[in-house]
Amino acid sequence: MSKNMWRTNGRMNFPIDSLVLFAPFGHPELSGASFSSKDLNAFTCSVTGAVHVPPVSRDMDGDDFEAIGGVADFSFVQNTGIFTACGWMKMTDHTADRGQALCGTTQHSDEKGFQFLYDDRVAAGQDKEFRVDIMKGELGVPVITSIGAANIITDNNFHFWVCTGDGSNAFFRVDRGNKAQGTSSMAAKSSGDSTNVMRAGATNGATPAHFLIGSQGTGWIFNADLSDNILDHIYDTTQRRYI
């Protein structure tokens, strides 16, 4: 077992064979303006503004983020459509007229990448919904724009955000329970690297956007569509830090 992997009660609380990123942002060891993710990839995470609040989170005030890894590291999302992105997040105001991202490399269809966010933008017709946009670098032709159920979050507490893809569709859930399929299905996918490096707590791109206002806890990305049973286990073994 790598020294870069932390344990919960002597056991891993997630499958490591499909793990790409494990970033417990509030861990006491991860202070400072740069740190390495605690997975076998040990991605460099460069911090802009996010305030370290150990042992739980980093606080974000609307222009903060962490830049993680390189342009090749998360391109499997748009190239395969098979992934799980999940993390503990807390918004200062869940009714704010804005999108707030778990992570993202772009919001623009003419770039290659993706974004996962909570969306309550009035102008976009969103109503407290999870959303994923996956792009292949073709203007106006995304791989998928998928939106979940309205009012997915109804308070300003920490919640476990989840978005997965099975290569054909996207699914969402919050906290414990069952994934629900979002709108739309995936079209032809991308190839090659992402256009931009991924940001956590915001979406990167030609016009960076969707900065979180709140607190960012532990985050994970897998190159697999995790089952509800595994997601429940991650939730159960980490929720004591947040609720």
Image: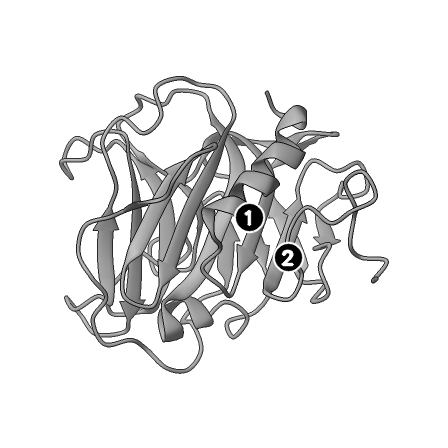
Given the current orientation, which residue lies at the most extreme bottom position?
Answer: 192
Q: Earlier in the sequence, mark 1 or mark 2?
A: 2
Q: CA distance from mark 1 to mark 2?
A: 8 Å
Q: Relative to the observer, which residue lies in front, 240 or 209?
A: 240
Location of mark 2 (residue): 15
Residue at the spot 49% in from the left edge and 64% down from the top edge: 224
Given the current orientation, which residue lies at the most extreme front position?
Answer: 229
Rendered location of residue 228, percent (x, y): 46, 46
Report whether 161 appears left or right of 220: left
Residue at the spot 35% in from the left edge and 25% down from the top edge: 153
| Colour setup of the view | one colour
Location of mark 1 (residue): 230
Circle 1: element type: helix
> In the picture shown, does residue 13 fall above or below 136?
above
Residue 184: quarter of image: bottom left
Rendered location of residue 132, percent (x, y): 31, 51
Report whether 162 appears left or right of 57: left
Q: Relative to the observer, which residue lies in front, 159 or 211?
A: 159
Q: Is residue 147 visible?
A: yes
Residue 27: quarter of image: top right
- Marks 2 and 1: in contact by CB < 8 Å? yes
Residue 53: quarter of image: top right
